[in-house]
């Protein structure tokens, strides 16, 4: 009887700790959320109400957005104790980069219905954009204040520029072989609900499986390097490194699916948005047999011919098996939310600042490196917001390493195409190449991921503030009876 009472008291304490954590998080995130909202508002106003000739006004807007981004990261670091929300809020400060991309580099303008020169798009491209948008152009024409504001927000809050002539590359489709088909509202809500629940359950299970008392040792700084410690590596450490990297990526994948799914569910169920506006964020893990394909054809315009592959489906059904199948059988894997946000400044840096000529190998890999470097800067701000010191963060190093991986595999693929003529390649050769690609990608990520992941894993102490999900369903259901 005493054991049962003790177990009940323990459960009450867990609930109290989680409740306090949620209360603190709710009150502490208000200021960072307000700052992030101001970033979005300033960006929308600059796009909708200023012209490309208003450079002083637009530069002033950049100063305001940069100040808000700095304060958002600073207040997140000081006030938000939950790791999950700290990372989300710091990542939302990308509106500064979004402002640079849309307002200063691409120079979006309401009067031009987009960047300068949009009205001179080729007839074919405009027709494709019109078909994607259900027979209507994405942007309104009348210059009322409401339409200007709506135009600004429709661009600012649409990182992939979906259903516009400027939609980013490698956006997944809903159904295999039917790129124009969109699921019904009911089917979308059903499949999204199942996706959220399964993703939430996976993250919850991973949180319970952590052993915080060992994190400082298992994920210590001296465990990040690999090749210079080959003589002291144990089989156990290799397994831990590979499994930690895999779980790290799966957690990010599921967290982003939860966030995207929750927002899309609220938008669709309330009637605020249409299903076509919420194309799935992720593609196929089955198509990720190279570093380039994993990240979604970085700088794909100049990629090798062997990388030209078709899109296939994601979220095509609403049952459990379909959720698993859709992770495996879709299009290029990682989300493209920041493709344009990072790619546009990278192109500006390479071609306008460094004056490197286009259509050259130097330009191609300079763009790739610059894109990943900018991504590293963004993730560095996220690391700082969750309490990782600048000197400990490996974000910039990790993302720049991805450019190295692409360079290496491009060289190998070029040698492959040179040594084996196309007419001599069989389906067996192609399948073998894919298998080798999967092994290469897995090994490369297992080598490079700890640079970015270990500093974050080290700081997990097992406190309620370390919960990735707002509350742990499994913890609340756990019936822990203390030993007599």
Image (cartoon, grey):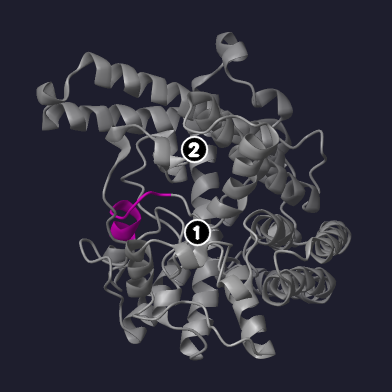
Residue 101, which numbered label? Answer: none
**Measured from the top left, where is residue 26 in percent x and y?**
77, 76
Residue, disc 1: 254
Q: Are discs 1 and 2 less than 8 Å apart at CB?
A: no
For the point 79% across and 47% down, the residue is 384
Seen from the viewer's position, the closer of residues 427 and 96 is: 96
Is residue 196 toward the left or the right of residue 37 in the image?
Answer: left
**Measured from the top left, where is residue 396 in percent x and y?**
68, 36
**Measured from the top left, where is residue 340 in percent x and y?**
56, 53
When the figure is inspected, residue 111 is found, relative to residue 293, above or below; the finding is below
Quarter occupied by residue 398: top right
- Mark 1 burial class by Cα count in 10 Å: few <14, some 14-19, many 20+: many
Q: Residues under labels 1 and 2: Cα distance?
A: 16 Å
Asked whether residue 286 is drawn in magenta, I would say no
The reply to whether residue 186 is in sight is yes
Q: Of callouts 1 and 2, which one flags the residue occurring earlier in the amino acid sequence?
A: 2
For the point 56% across and 63% down, the residue is 159
Q: For the residue labelled by badge 1, is the local secondary structure a helix, a strand or a loop?
A: helix
Quarter of the image with the N terminus in it: bottom right
Is residue 214 toward the left or the right of residue 315 in the image?
Answer: right
Query: What residue range appears in magenta?
Result: 324-333
For the point 12% across and 32% down, the residue is 427
Quarter of the image with the C terminus in it: bottom right
Q: For the residue labelled by badge 2, is the local secondary structure a helix, a strand or a loop?
A: helix
The reply to whether residue 450 is in sight is no
Residue, disc 2: 243
Quarter occupied by residue 64: bottom right
């Amino acid at each position: 009887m005493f054991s049962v009472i003790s177990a009940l008291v323990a459960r009450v304490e867990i609930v109290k700790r989680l409740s306090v954590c949620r209360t603190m998080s709710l009150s502490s995130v208000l200021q960072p959320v307000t700052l992030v909202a101001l970033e979005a508002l300033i960006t929308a106003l600059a796009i909708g109400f200023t012209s490309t000739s208003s450079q002083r006004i637009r530069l002033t807007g950049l100063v305001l957005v940069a100040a808000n981004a700095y304060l958002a990261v600073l207040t997140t670091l000081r006030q938000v104790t939950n790791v999950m929300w700290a990372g989300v809020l710091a990542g939302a400060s990308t509106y500064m980069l979004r402002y640079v991309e849309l307002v200063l580099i691409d120079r979006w303008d309401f009067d031009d219905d987009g960047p300068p020169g949009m009205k001179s798009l080729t007839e074919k491209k405009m027709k494709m954009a019109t078909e994607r948008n259900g027979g209507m152009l994405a942007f309104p024409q009348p210059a009322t204040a409401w339409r200007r504001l709506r135009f600004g927000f429709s661009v600012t809050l649409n990182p992939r520029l979906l259903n516009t002539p400027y939609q980013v590359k490698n956006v997944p489709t809903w159904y295999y072989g039917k790129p124009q088909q969109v699921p019904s509202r009911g089917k979308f809500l059903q499949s999204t609900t199942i996706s959220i629940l399964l993703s939430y359950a996976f993250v919850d299970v991973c949180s319970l499986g952590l052993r915080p008392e060992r994190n400082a040792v298992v994920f210590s700084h001296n465990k990040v390097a690999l090749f210079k410690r080959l003589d002291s590596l144990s089989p156990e450490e290799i397994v831990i490194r590979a499994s930690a990297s895999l779980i790290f990526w799966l957690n990010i994948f599921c967290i982003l699916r939860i966030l995207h799914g929750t927002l899309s569910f609220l938008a669709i169920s309330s009637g605020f948005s249409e299903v076509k506006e919420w194309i799935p964020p992720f593609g196929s893990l089955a198509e990720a047999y190279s570093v380039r394909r994993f990240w979604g054809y970085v700088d794909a315009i100049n990629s090798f011919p062997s990388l030209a592959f078709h899109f296939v489906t994601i979220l095509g059904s609403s049952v459990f098996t379909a959720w698993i199948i859709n992770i495996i059988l879709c299009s290029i894997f990682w989300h493209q939310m920041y493709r344009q946000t990072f790619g546009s400044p990278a192109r500006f840096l390479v071609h306008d600042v460094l004056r490197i000529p286009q259509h050259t190998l130097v330009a191609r890999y300079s763009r790739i490196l610059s894109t990943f470097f900018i991504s590293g800067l963004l993730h560095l701000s996220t690391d700082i917001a969750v309490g990782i010191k600048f000197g400990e963060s490996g974000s910039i190093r990790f993302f720049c390493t991805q450019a190295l991986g692409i360079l290496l595999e491009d060289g190998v693929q070029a040698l492959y195409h040179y040594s084996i003529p196309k007419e001599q390649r069989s389906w067996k050769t192609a399948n073998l190449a894919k298998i080798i690609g999967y092994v290469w990608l897995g090994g490369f990520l297992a080598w490079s991921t700890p640079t970015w992941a270990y500093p974050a894993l080290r700081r997990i102490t097992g406190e309620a503030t370390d919960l990735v999900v707002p509350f742990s369903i499994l913890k609340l259901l756990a019936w822990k009876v203390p030993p007599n």
